[in-house]
Image (cartoon, rainbow, N blue to C red):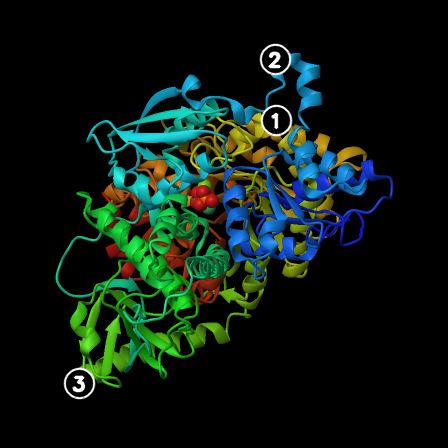
Amino acid sequence: MAEPQGDRAGSGGRASVGLVVVSHSRALASAAVALAAEMLHGREVRIEVAAGLDDRTFGTDAVQIREAIERVDGPGGVVVLMDLGSAVLSAELALDLLDDPTARDRVILSPAPIVEGLVVASVAAAGGAGRAEVAAEARNSLMGKAAHLGGPDHLTVPEAESPAQDEVVAVFTIGNRHGLHARPAARLVAEVRGLDATVRLSNLTTGAGPVPAGSLSRVATLGALRGHDVEVRASGRQAQDAVEHLLALAARDFDEVGDGVAATPVQPSRPGPLPGSPGIGIGPARHLTAEPVEPADDAPIAEPAAEWRRIVGSVAEVRREIEHVRVLTAREAGAGAAGIFDAHLSLLSDAELLGDVKRRISAGEGATGAWVASLAAVEQEWAALPDPYLRERAQDVRAVRDQVVRVLTGSTVRRPAGDGVLVAADLTPAEAAELDPERVSGVVLTQGSASSHAAILARARNIPLVVAAGGQVLAVPEGTMLVLDGGTGELQVDPPAEVLAAFRVRGAEMAERRARELALAGQPAVSMDGTSFAVSANLGSVADAWAAVAAGAEGAGLVRTEFLFLGRSSAPDLAEQQAEYDAIGAAMDGRRVTLRTLDVGGDKPLTYLPMPAEANPFLGVRGLRLSLATPDLLRDQLTAICRSARRWPTSVMFPMVTSLDELLEARRVLTEAAGPDGVPYDLRVGIMVEVPAAALKIESFLPHVDFVSIGTNDLTQYAVAAERGNPSVAALSDALDPAVLQLVAGVCSAALGRASVSVCGEAAADELAIPLLVGLGVRELSVTPAAVPRVKARLRALDVEQCRAAAEEALSLPGPDEVRKLAMSL
Ligand code: PEP
Ligand code: MG
């Protein structure tokens, strides 16, 4: 019963009706099956679950549903129960996918609610009812509840309501820097698709629309830019919910986070290649072996039903590919970067788009031709949008088009013929995910931008890459020598011997340096004058912990526990949290692990913690402020941390602390959470210093902490009043601003001999900042796992006295540029 795939309440004979439960949530579907089994008292019914994309990820998949239908199918037929909107679409697609054409006639897609419907349908099926009777029973399953709650007037099922009667209308204004481009639009679409409502949007500022809000291909054509007013009209049972959700989502800028791709500025147009991923790439040009296959005009076209099945199968296959790459990207480059794939997934389940494809197929076109034509229409609409950033998203449509065409035409993922510098117009997500640093020494793309998926994945793997190199590179003969610097955008085709030699020297120096640093990564970091430093790692997952140990980290100076809480519909329970912290503790193998309590807020919202929209989320209920406002959540987290601390060397750290009262309250909850055994004796308690007020009041905090960790990312944004991730103020947002250094200096001198001080913001990995931080008194740095060997090497080359003198001078300089100049001499 516990297995989500193949849950069975019995194994009744094949003549009886089989049931399939399609839900966005595997846990929900399995629980519904368990509940139904209670009513069967041992009688046998075949029930299969097709729910969730995996145990944790919400979604429905047509192939999974088809397989479930095939498993329970028999002469008695099958009744399928579905939950929200796109589950219905996936189930319909699944019918189109069935291999046995007669099976389709034996399957009934039921509009019944899944819990009541399943209970009633199971009992009816166990009693030997035929599939029509089982479906009818399920459809009427709400009657008992309706009669009980509302009398005879409520005996109609909700679907009977007229949508026109309950239209809800509202207007929201787009606040996103780049408008409603593909990623925020995909977020909007996802929000609406789950609801039982018909929602249409119009751009009041331009007059575009109305378009269905559940279709990404249509929503993007609204061309909604920052400041545009968008009208939402919703009807149906959940119309009010739909409008409220959309207004709240718009107020949160469609959850577009400031990190990752979303905040990457549009590259100014200038001739020649642009930087995409830093590093020196040298090698023979390697073109991809096969260009995207265009449909041949004379390709034989089968019956429309067969052509449509090919579309459904190919789309499902590409969905799975993209889901896989999404997980990879989230792990390697962060959740913000992984968000690019949401737009691709949304296109693949876009009912408008698929409807257009189906219409073309019914009119006699072949699968590939219909797919290409439908996608081309969307691409043209997007490419014609007036805003350049929105226009650029047409590349998302092209990527999805090519991926499906490749599956349809049987051409596999394109691969370069040999090792060297890969040259291509662009790469699909699947191709980018397959880039192998052992074989690909560099990548040249004629299209794309630094925010493309290829650039993100190349950066995550240290593969040098230039983008926007211009179409002429595609004509470069296979094997021609190419050199590139992905940090500057330099690219030379068939360079003269001296240029090639210079690039070789630069490349060799970088590679040698990396190899040297790696070879010494396991050694301690001791400066030239004999001062010891601790270099630990910032982690977001167990995989990061393994990487940290391999890179020579001496501990985990910051575990961003929010990764466990984000992107899901409910908070992880105590057991799940403890399992995660234990797994990190085990992976760190005796090294100290500093678990930071949940650090989310208006800028990183949790769907299960409704928070009021804030005009300035970075100044709102973030970090410890949010935890103290939700004490049950904080208590659970601290309980899990205490349990883990009884097994592994553990520290706990509170983020965004501003006042002593907050810290004392957090410590009180910690004592409560620790239970009768008390706070584990070895659990060290500390705070992040990332609000200038905390840095300036450090004296009052010191008696209550074992350590402090300076979060220079936030400390800088608050000290210089420049939002992190906002490219327009990026030049101001420099941790080497003497104002920030003054705050660090104050913390270090006050804490000397009383509490240890570490730095866990990005500045800890900045080679110019390191000597100054050391000079100010910092003795522990916590950085991304990959940076540990380099940071250790930098520390070994320092003389602390010299650093101290430079740091003192830096404090009196006017700005970060002068500080950088000074630091270059160290
Ligand atoms: C910081 O603010 O410097 C920090 C390390 O925390 P985060 O980047 O997670 O906000
Ligand atoms: Mg921070």
Q: Which residue is mark 2?
A: 153
Looking at the picture, how far across and down is residue 28, in whole percent?
Answer: 66, 40
Looking at the picture, does residue 395 appear above or below residue 646? below
Q: Nearer the viewer, mark 2 or mark 3?
A: 2
The span from disc 2 to disc 1 (Cα, nearest Å) is 52 Å
Looking at the picture, how far across and down is residue 628, in whole percent?
Answer: 58, 27
Mark 2 or mark 1: name the one nearer the start of the chain.
Answer: 2
Q: Which mark is residue 665?
A: 1
| Residue 727 image-quadrant placement | top left
Q: In the rendered picture of this protein, how many numbered marks are placed on residues?
A: 3
Looking at the rendering, the quadrant in which ligand 2 lies is top left
| Quadrant occupied by the C terminus | bottom left
The span from disc 1 to disc 3 (Cα, nearest Å) is 66 Å
Looking at the picture, does residue 332 appear above or below residue 498? above
**Amino acid type of the residue tagged 3 in the rendering:** Glu
Q: Which residue is mark 3?
A: 498
